[in-house]
Image: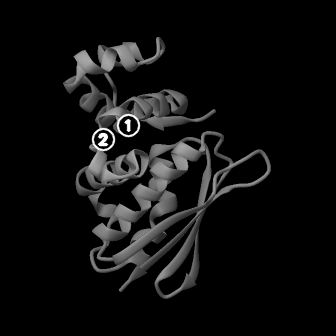
């Protein structure tokens, strides 16, 4: 099913630990041990566990934030790209930042392949193939992540739209537009 790097897990687990009393009843049996287990940033963890933890986090997103999955994706990008992977962002260069997306993906995931296609000076399509966890929820999360990635690189008026969630015979796709 694929795995995610501990750096992704740690950020989510730390937020859940802060809300432990409220979180514990919402977690499924397989996810509860993460509240006590040490998360190793260089280790790999099951992607389905990551998604389960994110699903729990959706209960704590402020209603004013809109779609909780999109908000969480943006929050994740803001945390990742302002800290550990800040070198992936090229300030003032959304295209340069997007071109680094395939490498960033491989730092976080051991499954799936990301491609970025140019569709104009301020328009791109991101395609994720061979990733079994690209559910509708994940795709909404990824739209938020991609939008924040563009914002951090200087894009304005950003629209990150999921064109298609992955299925057995097709990859997931997002259309990204922004103003320079």
List the residue tagged with mark 2: 61
Q: Is residue 63 above or below residue 126?
A: above
The answer to whether residue 66 shows anywhere in this view is: yes
The answer to whether residue 37 shows anywhere in this view is: no
Along the horizontal axis of the image, is 132 left or right of 99? right
List x then y, in percent, for residue 22. 26, 20
Q: Which residue extends farthest front?
A: 63
- The local secondary structure at tag 2 comes to loop
Q: Quadrant of residue 172?
A: bottom right
Q: Is residue 16 above or below residue 24?
A: below
Q: Quadrant of residue 2?
A: top right
Q: How crowded is the residue under tag 2: few (<14 C-alpha within 10 Å), some, or many (20+)?
A: some
Tell me if label 2 and label 1 are in contact, CB under 8 Å. Answer: yes
Q: How crowded is the residue under tag 1: few (<14 C-alpha within 10 Å), some, or many (20+)?
A: some
Distance between the alpha carbons at the discs numbered 2 and 1:
5 Å
Residue at point 25%, 29% (across, down): 14
Quarter of the rendering occupied by the C terminus = bottom left
List x then y, in percent, for residue 178. 41, 79
Residue at point 47%, 62% (across, down): 101
């Amino acid at each position: 099913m694929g795995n995610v790097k501990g750096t992704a897990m740690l950020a989510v687990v730390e937020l859940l630990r802060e809300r432990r009393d409220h979180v514990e009843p919402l977690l499924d049996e397989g996810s509860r041990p993460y509240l006590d287990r040490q998360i190793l940033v260089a280790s790999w963890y099951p992607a389905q566990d990551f998604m389960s933890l994110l699903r729990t986090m959706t209960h704590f997103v402020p209603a004013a934030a809109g779609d909780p999955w999109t908000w969480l994706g943006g929050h994740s990008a803001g945390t990742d790209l302002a800290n550990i992977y800040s070198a992936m962002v090229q300030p003032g260069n959304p295209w340069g930042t997007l071109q680094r997306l395939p490498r960033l993906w491989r730092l976080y995931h051991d499954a799936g392949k990301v491609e970025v296609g140019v569709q104009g000076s301020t328009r791109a399509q991101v395609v994720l193939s061979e990733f079994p966890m690209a559910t509708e929820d994940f795709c909404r999360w990824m739209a938020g992540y991609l939008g924040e990635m563009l914002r951090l690189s200087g894009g304005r008026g950003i629209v990150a739209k999921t064109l298609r969630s992955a299925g057995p015979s097709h990859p997931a796709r997002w259309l990204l537009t922004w103003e320079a």
